[in-house]
Image (cartoon, rainbow, N blue to C red):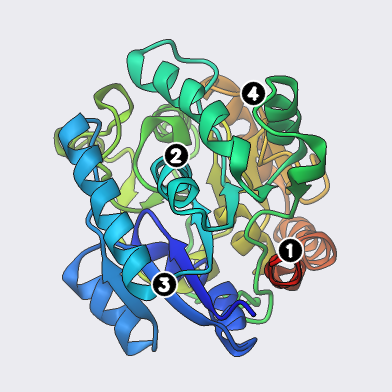
């Protein structure tokens, strides 16, 4: 009978936020759960205070020496806890973690949280990732996909087989936690809010460009940015401190820093904007819609499934600042009641289609089935 479950996460932040409820549900089902991950001392301590068992396996760069050390750390940790089932999330755990669990013969459930530019870029890192994905997923017990587009690509490429591919609604949304909160009064500006790690494929550059296009003719529009600089990405995808400071000094955006709780910031916005190039399933959009905020996002995988164009928000073209600016302008021209109505329809949609309980039930069923097969 399976009792010990290991979860390999890229960073403990995910356990403290989007996967906290899933992790607790697995624990409450009677499994001993250990999270193999890394993070800042503060975030690791927070997870400990929440009652999670953690082993710091550090992280890895693209340096083969770092990768080898990371895999050794994973191997040691999995042996130490005698893991019987392993769950992996995001690309690094999905590749290196699955290689380790395959060697140790630990049944593994992998979540493809999004593929980003995996099949678009031709640099060495992405070529290697494509090759490794096909290899490491061969012995994975079950692969969860967060949208149909990603699942179809992996099926067509022969990375997975139909019987082992399951689509779930992203990480789901806890609509009781992300419930509507009244906007504070006293702000005459129309607030648009971008929430994400500050990397270019989230559309931050296009958002800034759109803000610059609009600020002369729409001085009442305030474009805010919430989220951390993220220097772990490839250099061509990284926003620098200098760029961020430049946008602020020119008055194009108002930078709010980082936070562990996005709800007050979403509550204080009139519209949430995420012009991402591609997502698995956007948690930012799920949370914003759940809090009854209309959204503007790109007509792309992982975003278009959440926001219904002209109903719960607007869809714009990918990598097109002019089109994004036109959609922000369109939202600004609506009456307050029209934006409120959009937000209400958005909440109804995510409650119906993206309830976190759907994701939790899928995982508990998958773990139980592994137990029955042993």
User: Label 4 near label 3: C-beta < 8 Å?
Assistant: no
Disc 1 element: helix
Disc 4 element: loop
The residue lying toward the viewer, choosing from 141 and 223, is: 141
- Label 3: which residue? 82
* Mark 4 residue crowding within 10 angstroms, few (<14) / some (14–19) / many (20+): some
Residue 135 placed where, x, y %? 53, 29
| Location of the N terminus (image quadrant) | bottom right
- Label 1: which residue? 340
Residue 12 can be seen, yes or no: no
Residue 59 placed where, x, y %? 25, 50
Residue 30 can be seen, yes or no: yes
Specify the quadrant of the image occupied by residue 303.
Answer: top right
Which comes before the other along the chain, label 2 or label 3? 3
* Mark 3 residue crowding within 10 angstroms, few (<14) / some (14–19) / many (20+): some
- Label 2: which residue? 95
Which comes before the other along the chain, label 3 or label 4? 3
**Residue 269 has which mark?**
none
* Mark 2 residue crowding within 10 angstroms, few (<14) / some (14–19) / many (20+): many
Which comes before the other along the chain, label 1 or label 3? 3
Residue 129 placed where, x, y %? 44, 26
- Label 4: which residue? 317
Mark 1–mark 2 distance (CA, rounded to whole Å): 43 Å
The residue lying toward the viewer, choosing from 180 and 93, is: 93
Residue 144 placed where, x, y %? 68, 49
Q: Nearer the observer, disc 4 or disc 1?
A: 4
Mark 1–mark 3 distance (CA, rounded to whole Å): 51 Å
């Amino acid at each position: 009978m399976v009792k010990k479950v290991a979860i390999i996460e890229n960073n403990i932040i995910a356990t403290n936020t989007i996967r906290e409820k899933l992790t607790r549900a697995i624990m409450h089902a009677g499994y001993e759960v250990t999270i193999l991950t890394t993070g800042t001392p503060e975030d690791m301590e927070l997870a400990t205070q929440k009652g999670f068992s953690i082993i710091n396996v550090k992280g890895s760069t693209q340096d083969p020496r770092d990768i080898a050390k990371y895999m050794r750390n994973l191997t040691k940790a999995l042996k130490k806890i005698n893991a019987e089932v392993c769950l992996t999330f995001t690309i690094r755990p999905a590749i290196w973690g699955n290689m380790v669990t395959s060697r140790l013969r630990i049944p593994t459930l992998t979540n493809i949280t999004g593929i980003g530019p995996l099949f678009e870029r031709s640099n060495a890192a992405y070529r290697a990732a494509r090759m490794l994905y096909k290899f490491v997923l061969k012995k994975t017990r079950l692969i969860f996909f967060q949208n149909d587009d990603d699942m179809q690509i992996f099926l067509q490429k022969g990375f997975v087989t139909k019987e082992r591919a399951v689509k779930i609604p992203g990480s789901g949304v806890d609509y009781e936690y992300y419930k509507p909160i009244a906007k504070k009064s006293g702000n005459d500006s129309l607030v648009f809010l971008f929430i994400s790690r500050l990397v270019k494929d989230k559309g931050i550059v296009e958002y800034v460009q759109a803000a610059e296009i609009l600020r002369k003719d729409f001085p009442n529009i305030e474009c805010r940015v919430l989220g951390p600089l993220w220097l772990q990405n490839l250099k061509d995808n990284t926003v620098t401190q200098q760029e961020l400071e430049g946008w602020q000094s020119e008055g194009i955006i108002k930078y709010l820093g980082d936070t562990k709780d996005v709800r007050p910031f979403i509550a204080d916005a009139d519209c949430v904007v995420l012009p991402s190039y591609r997502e698995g399933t956007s948690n930012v959009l799920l949370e914003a819609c759940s809090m009854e905020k209309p959204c503007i996002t790109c007509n792309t995988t992982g975003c278009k499934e959440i926001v219904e164009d002209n109903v719960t928000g607007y869809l714009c073209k990918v990598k097109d600042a002019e089109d994004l600016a036109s959609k922000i302008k369109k939202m600004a021209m609506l009456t307050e009641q029209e934006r409120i109505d959009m937000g209400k329809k958005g909440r109804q949609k995510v409650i119906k289609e993206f309830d976190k309980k759907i994701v939790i039930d899928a995982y508990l069923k998958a773990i139980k089935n592994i137990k029955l097969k042993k």
